[in-house]
Image (cartoon, rainbow, N blue to C red):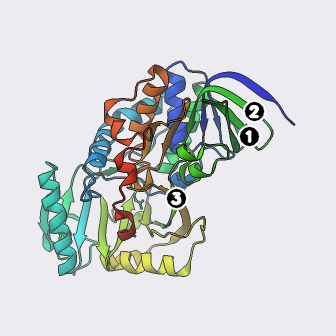
Amino acid sequence: MHSSRKGSDVLVIGGGIIGLVTAWRAAARGLRTVLADPAPGGGAAQVAAGMLAPVTELHYGEEALLGLGLASAARYPQFAAELADASGGMDIGYRACGTLAVALDSDDRLHLRELHALQRRCGLESEWLTGRECRRLEPMLAPGVRGGLRVDGDHQVDPRRLAAALLAACERAGVAVHRASAQRLLTTTDRATGALLDDGTELQAGQVVLAAGSLSGRLAGVPPEVVAPVRPVKGQVLRLTVPAAYAPFLSRTVRAVVRGSHVYLVPRENGELVVGATSEELGWDTTVTAGGVYELLRDAHELVPGITELPLTETRAGLRPGSPDNAPLIGPTDLPGLHLATGHYRNGVLLTPLTGDVLAELLATGELPEIARPFTPAGSPPHIRSRTHDHLRQR
Ligand code: GLY
Protein backbone atom coordinates (compact mmCIF):
# COMPACT_ATOMS: atom_id res chain seq x y z
CA MET A 1 0.00 0.00 0.00
CA HIS A 2 1.37 3.39 -0.96
CA SER A 3 0.21 6.51 0.74
CA SER A 4 1.61 9.96 0.95
CA ARG A 5 1.59 12.54 3.71
CA LYS A 6 2.54 16.10 3.04
CA GLY A 7 2.98 19.16 5.07
CA SER A 8 5.03 18.20 8.13
CA ASP A 9 7.60 20.71 9.23
CA VAL A 10 9.93 18.07 10.62
CA LEU A 11 10.52 14.38 9.98
CA VAL A 12 12.65 12.55 12.55
CA ILE A 13 14.10 9.24 11.36
CA GLY A 14 14.73 7.03 14.38
CA GLY A 15 12.76 6.63 17.59
CA GLY A 16 15.49 5.92 20.13
CA ILE A 17 15.98 8.43 22.92
CA ILE A 18 17.76 10.92 20.64
CA GLY A 19 15.06 10.82 17.95
CA LEU A 20 12.29 10.97 20.54
CA VAL A 21 13.74 13.91 22.44
CA THR A 22 14.23 15.76 19.17
CA ALA A 23 10.65 15.12 18.08
CA TRP A 24 9.18 16.03 21.48
CA ARG A 25 11.16 19.26 21.76
CA ALA A 26 10.38 20.20 18.14
CA ALA A 27 6.65 19.60 18.62
CA ALA A 28 6.75 21.61 21.85
CA ARG A 29 8.08 24.53 19.76
CA GLY A 30 4.97 24.34 17.60
CA LEU A 31 6.51 22.44 14.67
CA ARG A 32 4.35 19.78 13.01
CA THR A 33 6.49 16.73 13.62
CA VAL A 34 6.47 13.17 12.31
CA LEU A 35 8.71 10.34 13.53
CA ALA A 36 9.46 7.03 11.82
CA ASP A 37 10.68 3.93 13.64
CA PRO A 38 9.46 0.31 13.57
CA ALA A 39 9.80 0.06 17.37
CA PRO A 40 9.87 3.55 18.90
CA GLY A 41 11.37 3.68 22.38
CA GLY A 42 13.72 0.77 21.58
CA GLY A 43 17.37 0.87 20.55
CA ALA A 44 20.49 1.19 22.64
CA ALA A 45 18.62 2.80 25.57
CA GLN A 46 17.04 -0.58 26.28
CA VAL A 47 20.50 -1.89 27.13
CA ALA A 48 22.34 1.17 28.48
CA ALA A 49 23.11 1.55 32.18
CA GLY A 50 22.27 5.27 32.20
CA MET A 51 25.35 6.73 33.87
CA LEU A 52 25.53 10.51 33.65
CA ALA A 53 29.28 10.62 34.06
CA PRO A 54 31.08 13.41 32.20
CA VAL A 55 33.69 13.74 34.97
CA THR A 56 34.48 10.05 35.52
CA GLU A 57 34.50 9.37 31.76
CA LEU A 58 36.83 12.27 30.92
CA HIS A 59 39.54 11.41 28.39
CA TYR A 60 42.58 13.31 27.15
CA GLY A 61 41.78 15.42 24.10
CA GLU A 62 38.03 15.35 24.69
CA GLU A 63 37.63 18.69 26.47
CA ALA A 64 35.01 19.96 23.97
CA LEU A 65 32.97 16.82 24.60
CA LEU A 66 33.39 17.40 28.34
CA GLY A 67 31.77 20.83 27.98
CA LEU A 68 28.82 19.30 26.16
CA GLY A 69 28.46 16.54 28.76
CA LEU A 70 28.61 18.93 31.71
CA ALA A 71 26.04 21.22 30.12
CA SER A 72 23.69 18.31 29.50
CA ALA A 73 24.19 16.86 33.00
CA ALA A 74 23.33 20.26 34.48
CA ARG A 75 20.04 20.26 32.55
CA TYR A 76 18.92 16.85 33.84
CA PRO A 77 16.98 17.84 36.99
CA GLN A 78 14.89 20.40 35.10
CA PHE A 79 14.59 18.07 32.10
CA ALA A 80 13.31 15.22 34.32
CA ALA A 81 10.71 17.55 35.82
CA GLU A 82 9.55 18.84 32.41
CA LEU A 83 9.38 15.31 31.05
CA ALA A 84 7.35 14.10 34.03
CA ASP A 85 4.92 16.91 33.29
CA ALA A 86 4.80 16.30 29.55
CA SER A 87 4.42 12.52 29.85
CA GLY A 88 1.55 12.59 32.33
CA GLY A 89 3.65 11.93 35.43
CA MET A 90 6.28 9.37 34.32
CA ASP A 91 9.39 9.22 36.48
CA ILE A 92 12.68 8.61 34.63
CA GLY A 93 14.60 7.44 37.70
CA TYR A 94 16.98 10.38 37.89
CA ARG A 95 19.13 9.64 40.92
CA ALA A 96 21.75 12.08 42.24
CA CYS A 97 23.83 9.27 43.71
CA GLY A 98 27.42 10.15 42.70
CA THR A 99 30.13 7.77 41.49
CA LEU A 100 33.17 6.08 42.99
CA ALA A 101 35.92 4.98 40.58
CA VAL A 102 38.29 2.57 42.32
CA ALA A 103 41.69 0.98 41.72
CA LEU A 104 42.49 -2.68 42.37
CA ASP A 105 46.26 -2.62 41.76
CA SER A 106 49.10 -0.16 41.42
CA ASP A 107 48.61 0.26 37.64
CA ASP A 108 44.93 1.09 38.16
CA ARG A 109 45.89 3.51 40.88
CA LEU A 110 48.35 5.28 38.60
CA HIS A 111 45.68 5.48 35.89
CA LEU A 112 43.18 6.99 38.35
CA ARG A 113 45.78 9.43 39.68
CA GLU A 114 46.29 10.66 36.12
CA LEU A 115 42.56 10.99 35.65
CA HIS A 116 42.38 12.94 38.91
CA ALA A 117 45.13 15.32 37.72
CA LEU A 118 43.33 15.82 34.40
CA GLN A 119 40.05 16.50 36.18
CA ARG A 120 41.73 19.11 38.36
CA ARG A 121 43.32 20.79 35.35
CA CYS A 122 39.84 20.99 33.84
CA GLY A 123 38.47 22.55 37.04
CA LEU A 124 36.32 19.52 37.90
CA GLU A 125 35.40 18.33 41.35
CA SER A 126 36.67 14.96 42.49
CA GLU A 127 38.32 13.72 45.65
CA TRP A 128 41.06 11.13 46.09
CA LEU A 129 40.24 8.48 48.72
CA THR A 130 42.32 5.72 50.28
CA GLY A 131 41.12 2.13 50.02
CA ARG A 132 39.83 2.31 53.57
CA GLU A 133 37.89 5.49 52.84
CA CYS A 134 36.38 3.86 49.75
CA ARG A 135 35.18 0.89 51.83
CA ARG A 136 33.77 3.20 54.45
CA LEU A 137 31.59 4.72 51.73
CA GLU A 138 30.76 1.39 50.09
CA PRO A 139 31.22 -1.51 52.54
CA MET A 140 30.61 -4.17 49.84
CA LEU A 141 33.85 -3.23 48.05
CA ALA A 142 36.61 -5.84 48.00
CA PRO A 143 39.29 -5.59 50.69
CA GLY A 144 41.87 -5.30 47.90
CA VAL A 145 40.65 -1.89 46.67
CA ARG A 146 43.73 0.35 46.76
CA GLY A 147 42.15 3.78 46.47
CA GLY A 148 39.61 5.65 44.44
CA LEU A 149 38.14 8.84 43.12
CA ARG A 150 34.92 10.14 44.60
CA VAL A 151 32.91 12.11 42.05
CA ASP A 152 29.78 13.43 43.70
CA GLY A 153 28.46 15.11 40.54
CA ASP A 154 28.20 12.01 38.28
CA HIS A 155 24.68 10.59 38.62
CA GLN A 156 22.33 8.17 36.84
CA VAL A 157 18.95 7.84 35.16
CA ASP A 158 17.01 4.74 34.07
CA PRO A 159 17.22 4.72 30.23
CA ARG A 160 14.24 2.39 29.79
CA ARG A 161 12.04 4.72 31.79
CA LEU A 162 13.52 7.67 29.92
CA ALA A 163 12.59 6.11 26.57
CA ALA A 164 9.05 5.29 27.71
CA ALA A 165 8.51 8.81 29.07
CA LEU A 166 9.85 10.41 25.88
CA LEU A 167 7.51 8.30 23.74
CA ALA A 168 4.54 9.29 25.90
CA ALA A 169 5.60 12.96 25.75
CA CYS A 170 5.85 12.76 21.95
CA GLU A 171 2.38 11.29 21.64
CA ARG A 172 0.90 13.86 24.02
CA ALA A 173 2.65 16.69 22.13
CA GLY A 174 1.05 15.56 18.88
CA VAL A 175 4.03 13.91 17.18
CA ALA A 176 2.72 11.53 14.51
CA VAL A 177 4.58 8.27 15.12
CA HIS A 178 4.89 5.89 12.14
CA ARG A 179 5.81 2.36 13.15
CA ALA A 180 7.87 1.58 10.04
CA SER A 181 11.51 1.87 8.94
CA ALA A 182 12.80 4.66 6.76
CA GLN A 183 14.09 2.96 3.65
CA ARG A 184 15.29 5.87 1.55
CA LEU A 185 15.87 9.57 1.98
CA LEU A 186 13.88 11.61 -0.52
CA THR A 187 15.71 14.52 -2.12
CA THR A 188 15.29 17.05 -4.89
CA THR A 189 18.37 18.28 -6.72
CA ASP A 190 19.45 20.44 -3.83
CA ARG A 191 17.72 19.42 -0.59
CA ALA A 192 16.25 16.67 1.55
CA THR A 193 12.47 16.54 1.34
CA GLY A 194 11.38 13.47 3.30
CA ALA A 195 11.66 9.71 3.38
CA LEU A 196 10.11 6.59 1.90
CA LEU A 197 9.18 4.02 4.57
CA ASP A 198 9.29 0.26 4.14
CA ASP A 199 5.48 0.06 4.32
CA GLY A 200 5.29 2.25 1.20
CA THR A 201 4.43 5.47 3.02
CA GLU A 202 6.09 8.59 1.69
CA LEU A 203 6.64 11.28 4.30
CA GLN A 204 7.39 14.79 3.11
CA ALA A 205 8.83 17.40 5.44
CA GLY A 206 10.51 20.78 5.37
CA GLN A 207 13.41 19.44 7.46
CA VAL A 208 14.63 15.91 8.13
CA VAL A 209 16.58 14.80 11.19
CA LEU A 210 18.50 11.55 10.91
CA ALA A 211 18.68 10.12 14.43
CA ALA A 212 18.89 6.40 13.78
CA GLY A 213 21.75 5.56 16.17
CA SER A 214 24.23 3.03 14.82
CA LEU A 215 22.03 2.61 11.69
CA SER A 216 22.37 6.27 10.72
CA GLY A 217 25.01 5.60 8.09
CA ARG A 218 22.89 3.03 6.26
CA LEU A 219 19.94 5.03 4.97
CA ALA A 220 19.72 4.76 1.18
CA GLY A 221 19.50 7.95 -0.85
CA VAL A 222 21.83 9.99 1.35
CA PRO A 223 24.51 11.61 -0.86
CA PRO A 224 27.91 10.00 -0.11
CA GLU A 225 29.46 13.24 1.10
CA VAL A 226 26.93 13.63 3.91
CA VAL A 227 26.63 10.00 5.04
CA ALA A 228 26.93 9.89 8.84
CA PRO A 229 30.31 8.36 9.82
CA VAL A 230 28.92 6.08 12.52
CA ARG A 231 29.55 2.43 13.23
CA PRO A 232 28.08 -0.05 15.71
CA VAL A 233 30.09 -0.74 18.88
CA LYS A 234 28.64 -3.69 20.74
CA GLY A 235 28.11 -3.52 24.49
CA GLN A 236 27.04 -6.52 26.56
CA VAL A 237 25.30 -5.61 29.81
CA LEU A 238 23.99 -7.68 32.73
CA ARG A 239 21.14 -6.97 35.11
CA LEU A 240 21.11 -8.43 38.61
CA THR A 241 18.56 -7.94 41.36
CA VAL A 242 19.39 -6.95 44.91
CA PRO A 243 16.87 -8.64 47.25
CA ALA A 244 15.38 -6.25 49.81
CA ALA A 245 17.19 -8.11 52.61
CA TYR A 246 20.59 -7.15 51.08
CA ALA A 247 19.80 -3.45 50.57
CA PRO A 248 21.52 -1.08 50.46
CA PHE A 249 24.02 -3.15 48.51
CA LEU A 250 25.72 -0.19 46.83
CA SER A 251 24.65 3.40 47.31
CA ARG A 252 26.33 4.92 44.26
CA THR A 253 27.79 3.85 40.89
CA VAL A 254 31.02 1.94 41.40
CA ARG A 255 33.43 1.49 38.52
CA ALA A 256 36.99 0.51 37.71
CA VAL A 257 39.36 -0.41 34.93
CA VAL A 258 40.25 -4.07 35.43
CA ARG A 259 43.05 -5.48 33.24
CA GLY A 260 42.52 -2.59 30.85
CA SER A 261 38.73 -3.05 30.59
CA HIS A 262 36.04 -0.82 32.03
CA VAL A 263 33.50 -2.34 34.40
CA TYR A 264 30.74 -0.48 36.19
CA LEU A 265 27.97 -1.35 38.65
CA VAL A 266 24.97 0.98 38.66
CA PRO A 267 22.50 0.45 41.53
CA ARG A 268 18.91 1.57 41.02
CA GLU A 269 16.55 2.48 43.81
CA ASN A 270 14.20 -0.37 42.77
CA GLY A 271 16.88 -3.01 43.46
CA GLU A 272 18.13 -3.45 39.89
CA LEU A 273 21.93 -3.58 39.63
CA VAL A 274 23.27 -2.98 36.13
CA VAL A 275 26.73 -4.36 35.33
CA GLY A 276 28.41 -3.24 32.12
CA ALA A 277 29.82 -3.22 29.62
CA THR A 278 31.88 -4.85 26.93
CA SER A 279 33.03 -2.76 23.97
CA GLU A 280 33.39 -4.84 20.84
CA GLU A 281 33.91 -3.91 17.20
CA LEU A 282 31.88 -6.76 15.68
CA GLY A 283 29.59 -5.03 13.23
CA TRP A 284 25.90 -5.75 13.71
CA ASP A 285 26.32 -8.72 16.01
CA THR A 286 24.21 -8.54 19.20
CA THR A 287 24.84 -12.04 20.52
CA VAL A 288 25.30 -12.33 24.26
CA THR A 289 28.36 -14.53 24.63
CA ALA A 290 29.55 -16.74 27.47
CA GLY A 291 32.89 -14.93 27.30
CA GLY A 292 31.29 -11.49 27.59
CA VAL A 293 29.16 -12.50 30.57
CA TYR A 294 32.10 -14.30 32.18
CA GLU A 295 34.43 -11.31 31.87
CA LEU A 296 31.88 -8.85 33.22
CA LEU A 297 31.06 -11.08 36.19
CA ARG A 298 34.74 -11.84 36.84
CA ASP A 299 35.70 -8.14 36.85
CA ALA A 300 32.63 -7.03 38.82
CA HIS A 301 33.32 -9.80 41.34
CA GLU A 302 36.86 -8.50 41.85
CA LEU A 303 35.37 -5.14 42.79
CA VAL A 304 32.34 -6.33 44.76
CA PRO A 305 32.66 -10.03 45.69
CA GLY A 306 29.11 -10.18 47.06
CA ILE A 307 27.54 -9.93 43.60
CA THR A 308 27.81 -13.70 43.17
CA GLU A 309 24.97 -14.03 45.71
CA LEU A 310 22.57 -11.97 43.57
CA PRO A 311 20.08 -13.35 41.04
CA LEU A 312 21.22 -12.70 37.45
CA THR A 313 18.01 -11.49 35.84
CA GLU A 314 18.96 -10.36 32.36
CA THR A 315 21.77 -10.41 29.82
CA ARG A 316 21.59 -8.27 26.73
CA ALA A 317 23.75 -6.65 24.05
CA GLY A 318 23.20 -3.33 22.31
CA LEU A 319 24.95 -1.25 19.68
CA ARG A 320 26.43 2.13 20.54
CA PRO A 321 26.59 4.58 17.63
CA GLY A 322 30.36 5.09 17.52
CA SER A 323 31.79 8.13 15.73
CA PRO A 324 35.34 8.73 14.48
CA ASP A 325 36.30 10.82 17.53
CA ASN A 326 33.77 9.60 20.13
CA ALA A 327 31.87 12.88 19.90
CA PRO A 328 28.33 13.20 18.55
CA LEU A 329 27.31 14.64 15.18
CA ILE A 330 24.69 17.28 15.90
CA GLY A 331 23.45 19.86 13.45
CA PRO A 332 22.99 20.59 9.76
CA THR A 333 24.75 18.67 7.03
CA ASP A 334 25.94 20.06 3.70
CA LEU A 335 22.64 18.86 2.20
CA PRO A 336 20.07 21.58 2.96
CA GLY A 337 17.12 20.23 4.92
CA LEU A 338 19.07 17.27 6.37
CA HIS A 339 20.34 17.40 9.95
CA LEU A 340 22.11 14.76 12.00
CA ALA A 341 21.59 13.83 15.64
CA THR A 342 23.68 10.71 15.97
CA GLY A 343 27.12 9.30 16.87
CA HIS A 344 26.57 9.77 20.61
CA TYR A 345 28.66 6.63 21.25
CA ARG A 346 29.01 6.14 25.05
CA ASN A 347 27.13 9.35 25.91
CA GLY A 348 23.65 9.09 24.42
CA VAL A 349 21.75 9.08 27.70
CA LEU A 350 23.88 11.88 29.14
CA LEU A 351 23.50 14.05 26.03
CA THR A 352 19.75 13.53 25.54
CA PRO A 353 18.53 16.80 27.16
CA LEU A 354 21.09 18.94 25.39
CA THR A 355 20.59 17.26 22.02
CA GLY A 356 16.84 17.86 22.22
CA ASP A 357 17.30 21.53 23.05
CA VAL A 358 19.93 22.11 20.37
CA LEU A 359 17.96 20.38 17.62
CA ALA A 360 14.72 22.13 18.55
CA GLU A 361 16.45 25.49 18.39
CA LEU A 362 18.01 24.64 15.03
CA LEU A 363 14.70 23.37 13.63
CA ALA A 364 12.69 26.33 14.91
CA THR A 365 15.13 29.16 14.12
CA GLY A 366 17.69 27.84 11.64
CA GLU A 367 20.45 28.71 14.13
CA LEU A 368 22.67 26.05 15.68
CA PRO A 369 23.37 27.04 19.31
CA GLU A 370 26.98 27.97 20.01
CA ILE A 371 27.62 24.99 22.29
CA ALA A 372 26.94 22.51 19.46
CA ARG A 373 28.99 24.22 16.76
CA PRO A 374 32.17 22.16 17.27
CA PHE A 375 30.02 19.06 16.63
CA THR A 376 28.23 20.07 13.47
CA PRO A 377 28.65 17.72 10.52
CA ALA A 378 28.38 20.59 8.00
CA GLY A 379 31.69 21.38 6.32
CA SER A 380 33.32 18.26 7.81
CA PRO A 381 35.21 20.10 10.58
CA PRO A 382 38.49 18.76 11.92
CA HIS A 383 36.91 16.88 14.83
CA ILE A 384 35.39 14.46 12.35
CA ARG A 385 38.55 14.05 10.32
CA SER A 386 40.80 13.55 13.36
CA ARG A 387 40.62 10.17 15.01
CA THR A 388 41.71 9.82 18.62
CA HIS A 389 41.13 6.05 18.69
CA ASP A 390 40.23 6.35 22.36
CA HIS A 391 37.33 4.01 21.74
CA LEU A 392 39.76 1.23 20.81
CA ARG A 393 41.24 1.34 24.29
CA GLN A 394 37.88 1.10 25.99
CA ARG A 395 35.99 -1.99 26.75
N1 GLY B 1 28.56 4.92 28.83
C1 GLY B 1 28.83 3.59 29.15
C2 GLY B 1 28.98 2.68 28.02
O1 GLY B 1 28.79 3.04 26.87
O2 GLY B 1 29.31 1.54 28.26
User: In the rendering, at what x and y percent does residue 391 appear?
Assistant: 38, 64
Q: Which quadrant holds the N terminus?
A: top right
Q: Secondary structure at mark 2?
A: strand
Q: Report the residue that reaches farthest toward the right.
A: 1
Cα gap from disc 3 to disc 1, whole angstroms: 22 Å
Q: Which residue is depicted at the point 42% across and 29% down? A: 82
User: In the rendering, at what x and y percent does residue 344 appear?
Assistant: 44, 50
- Decide if residue 131 is on the left or right side of residue 219: left
Kind of residue indicated by mark 2: Glu
Q: Are marks 2 and 1 in contact (CB under 8 Å)?
A: yes
| Mark closest to the chain's N terminus, 2 or 1 | 1
Which mark is drawn over residue 231?
Answer: 3
Respond yes or no on whether mark 1 lies under 8 Å from ligand 1: no
Q: How many marks?
A: 3
- Decide if residue 269 is on the left or right side of residue 136: right
Residue at the spot of label 1: 197
Kind of residue indicated by mark 3: Arg
Q: Quadrant of residue 210?
A: top right
